[in-house]
Amino acid sequence: MRDKIVSRLAENDTVMTPDAWEYLNDLDHSEDLSVIIDKMEEEKEELPFPVCKDTVNCFVRDVLELEEEKEDRSDEDNEIDRDIWKDIEVLKDISGESTCTGEVDDFRSYFDDRFERLRSIIRERRDGKKARPINRIEKRSGEATVIGMIRDVYTSSNDNKVLTLEDDTGEIRGFISSDSEAYNRNLLEDEVILAKGQVWDNDGSFEDTFSIEEITRPGIPKLNNKTKADFSGKIAFVGDAHVGSDTFLREEWDEFISWINSDSGAAAEIEYLVLPGDLVDGIGIFPNQEEELDIIDIYKQYQKFADLIEEIPSDITVITIPGNHDIVRNAEPQPCLPEEIQDMFPDNVLFFGNPALMEIQGLQLLLYHGTSINDLSDILPQVTSEKPITAMKEMLDRRHLVPVYGESTPIAPEEKDHLVIEDIPDIFVTGHIHRTEVSDHHGIVMVNASTWQGQTNYQEMRDIQPDPAKVIVLDPGTNNVSIRDFS
Ligand SMILES: [Fe+2]
Ligand SMILES: [Fe+2]
């Protein structure tokens, strides 16, 4: 060590007092020695002659402090990397799990699986255990309870509801008279219900032999509001960004970015940002869409969005799923965005499929883009697209995210039905419909997140009013909700 110091200093004619020599020679941080001598050499014109111990000490302190700062910064970086997942555990996500080959048989096994999963849920309901297979009740008279999938349902000329129920053993036709409470239940094809009523003794034909008096859906048992007092931070629901659209609300978005970067109130406490799909406007989603685009290349749309997301503080975890405007397959469930897109984004952005169920700090969050809200509002009188929560309640009641098959929401026939709501979430979030709504249903916090796209020509033509540029902030510790308006 001494030789090294002597040769380095001799090269520059630096002369030291004996105690300065001693001090440098005994230094613990020998790995920093060359840096210290380099610094001294840089400033040798200013050095006293001979160089005393105090002067050497100043250089040593400067170099060691610099090294410490570097270490702190790299620790911080590592911490951000480690914390990106912030206690998030993925429970259900189609990404990488798709079995769909597009064969007709796939649909058969898909619906068998849907029936099986929903039947198991209904079996846990009141009267669920009393249900018998359809082939065991059709030739008997008296009270009967079955669980079946509705194959068809219509209103007859004498104003009864007529429906065919099927299970894996057979089928039975039932009717609901117009004075029965069950008459107004707005039954849908392919939904799975428990039907309780009377079977009339006849010749074994399945025609109109089952008078249905009560209908039970899988439903949601009444739960108490579940808050999590020790939940760290808040969750912000941001909504459909639609970057690339010529009505993307850039000024409002920039205001949101300034707010989220400020230390004011709720902004400083946000740890998770949720974007439930339609991250970009896409291309070819509807006829002549290119006339309404600012960016006509979908990759450039994602690159632009990635640049915008870069401005969100890197210690906030950004949770995304795709929607019907994104680059993945249109049929649901949709896998997460491809890697080439993910690579454009900073490390604090996480990509999941649509739908996705995850646990965050022990709370279950169900994310679904919400494409089926349109179908439900077209078919069910109690659902309106202005109030998407009405559709979300129907999904929860039927325990299915796409209860209507064959309308505008395409379904990929996976072996397993990923759209069944098997686990009851604590928080259920959708987007798609460009409204901003928060509610509670049997203890589940329901959120329909907003949008950053102004009214489009299509919406103007149909008099659809979006409710854009709003951020819903949830404190899961108390279930308090606030809505920040940037419009
Ligand atoms: Fe959207
Ligand atoms: Fe959408």
Image (spheres, rainbow, N blue to C red):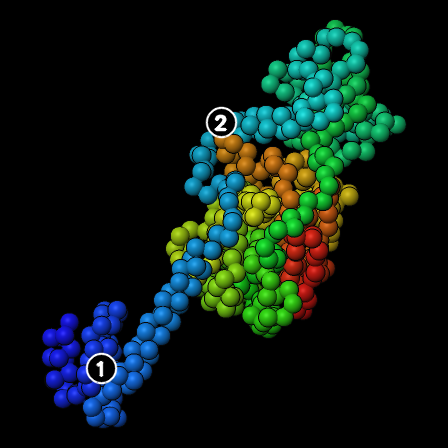
Residue 43: percent from left, percent from top = 25, 88
Q: Three-letter amino acid code at disc 2?
A: Asp
Q: Which residue is mark 1?
A: 19
Residue 81: percent from left, percent from top = 42, 57
Compared with 101, 7 (above or below) is below
Q: Three-letter amino acid code at disc 1?
A: Asp
Compared with 400, 354 (above or below) is below
SS category of the residue bearing label 1: helix
Most foreground residue, 70 or 456: 70
Q: Is residue 43 left or right of residue 368?
A: left
C-alpha distance separating marks 2 and 1? 88 Å
Callout in the foreground (2, 1): 1
Q: Residue at x 56, y 57 (%)?
A: 272
The answer to whether residue 145 is visible is: yes
SS category of the residue bearing label 2: helix
Which quadrant does the N terminus fall into? bottom left
How would you rate the neighbour count of disc 1 (Cα within 10 Å): few for under 14, some for 14-19, many for 20 or more? Answer: few
Q: Quadrant of residue 116?
A: top right
Q: Residue at x 17, y 87 (%)?
A: 14
Q: Residue at x 52, y 66 (%)?
A: 312
Residue 178: percent from left, percent from top = 86, 28
Most foreground residue, 319 or 460: 319
The answer to whether residue 104 is visible is: no
Q: Which residue is mark 2?
A: 105
Q: Is residue 480 left or right of residue 9?
A: right
Label at residue 106:
none
Q: Residue at x 56, y 48 (%)?
A: 360
Residue 347: percent from left, percent from top = 43, 59
Which quadrant does the C terminus fall into? bottom right
